[in-house]
Image (spheres, helix red, strand yellow):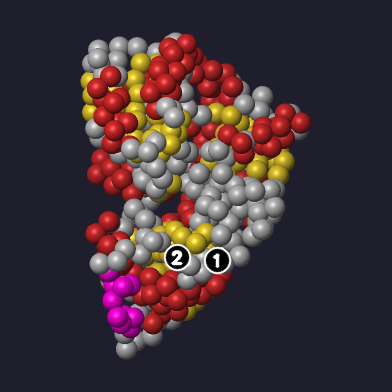
Amino acid sequence: MTRLACFKAYDIRGRVGDELTEELATRISAAFVAATGASSIVVGHDCRASSPALAAAITEGALLAGADVSDIGQCGTEEVYFATDHLEAGGGLMITASHNPISDNGIKLIGAGAAPISQGQLQAIHDRVLSDELPTQCRHGAYTTQDPRAAYCQRVLSFINPAKLPSLRILVNAGNGTAGPTFDALTEVLCAAGAPLEFIRLHHDPDSTFPNGIPNPLLPENRPVTAEAVRVHQADLGIAWDGDFDRCFFFDENGDFVDGEYIVGLLAAAMLDRAPGGTIVHDPRVQWNTLAEVVRAGGVAQVSRTGHVLIKETMRRFDAVYGGEMSAHHYFRAFMFCDSGMIPWLLVAARMSALGQPLSAIIANMRAAFPSSGEINFRVDDADAAIAEVTNTMLEGAVSVDHLDGLSAEFPDWRFNLRRSNTEPLLRLNIEARRDAGLVAEKLSVFRNMLERP
């Protein structure tokens, strides 16, 4: 059977008008209703130019398939997660391409209770889309508009005590994505509740043309604008989001970017203060700092393969209080086990208050104890051959080797993880060490010599 190009491992993404059309979106939503049995769904969309039309097409397909539709309009992905659970819908569909190129769009598929849909369900949806008939029912679904943002704000703010936050000047960069309006609604309630915070807004208004580039602070070349603004405005904290704000990135008061694995450790400790002895889920790419923070806080660490569906499944299985990925996805049990880009910055601000330290000082201790390379991408012609060479030459002296997510090897004073990209001919490498940044650089040089051959 032909595989539709827009169906990826966990969601739908592709070029608009080519790989993803309005007609196809209608068929996808009808198939979603048929495959999941959802009698009602939530629909939301980001600020891309193609998103309203795709949302209308998705609504049409769901109504034809007999499901009621609650349209929450322009929003972030986490607001569809919340609304799906809050409105007790049978599922949710979020139209977004997040940080993909401007020519793309996509659909994130959400099950009842904001649970991820399984790969089996995604395959069933794919196969129904390819069938000859558009699934319809005698009953036509009912359409309503909903605005659950006030309830969403209350849920997000339940993670902190606004009056106990420190007096901070915070620089926020929404990247002209959808974060701005939601952030404004949240901070209006936050400050009314007594939070002594001041905000400087950068690229705040949603703009489908993305005049300042596609918002993706994970890329180093996209960070200087936020870093410089933090320094110019003498902010205590910098925050930047991607297009649908399900990822949240941090800059300290010096404008220095904070690598994601250290934020995972920080948030793990913060959440264990709320839930002593709880379980923390983490990905295996960079983990030593997280493990140390979890042990120090009296929690239990549980590793999971990388990817939001896998992290969420692991969290639900172990009833974990928090889960984090170094790629800036942060998941919370009290938020339907889903990822949020708004909860993390509130918790970081609260943690700064609790420790009485600026973010730079908190992170400096972690970075000194467990320096890391950051994720390094290598474009290779033959991934299997490259991994085989690493296996044959780099594992001598390893105290443990595992293949949970790519190839991970741990040595007494350093470890690495090497994994394939799901979408590109790339290998992704992460190296970490114990109190020896020079060792990280030394091992990275060895890998470069091996993987960057002409």
Task: Answer above or below: position of 380 versus 64.
Answer: above
Q: Dot 2 corresponds to which residue?
A: 19
Reading the chain from its start, which is encountered first: label 1 or label 2?
Answer: 2
Q: Relative to residue 252, is residue 437 drawn left or right? A: left
Measured from the top left, where is residue 52 in percent x and y? 56, 69
Magenta-drawn stretch contains 387 = no
Find the magenta span and give its range.
Answer: 127-136
Q: Dot 1 corresponds to which residue?
A: 51
Magenta-drawn stretch contains 134 = yes
Q: Count the marks: how many?
A: 2
> Which amino acid type is shown beneath numbered disc 2?
Glu
Mark 1 element type: helix
Tell me the crowding category of disc 2: few under 14, some 14 to 19, or many 20 or more residues within 10 angstroms, Cα based.
Answer: some
Tell me the crowding category of disc 1: few under 14, some 14 to 19, or many 20 or more residues within 10 angstroms, Cα based.
Answer: many
Cβ–Cβ under 8 Å for marks 1 and 2: no
Question: Residue at position x 35%, y 24% from top?
Answer: 416
Main secondary structure found in the magenta portion: loop
Question: Residue at position x 38%, y 85% from top?
Answer: 140
Q: Relative to residue 200, is residue 297 drawn left or right? A: left
Seen from the viewer's position, the closer of residues 153 and 359 is 359
- Does residue 267 appear in the picture of this structure? no
Question: Residue at position x 38%, y 75% from top?
Answer: 27
Task: Answer above or below: position of 393 versus 347.
Answer: above
The nearer-to-camera label among 1 and 2 is 2
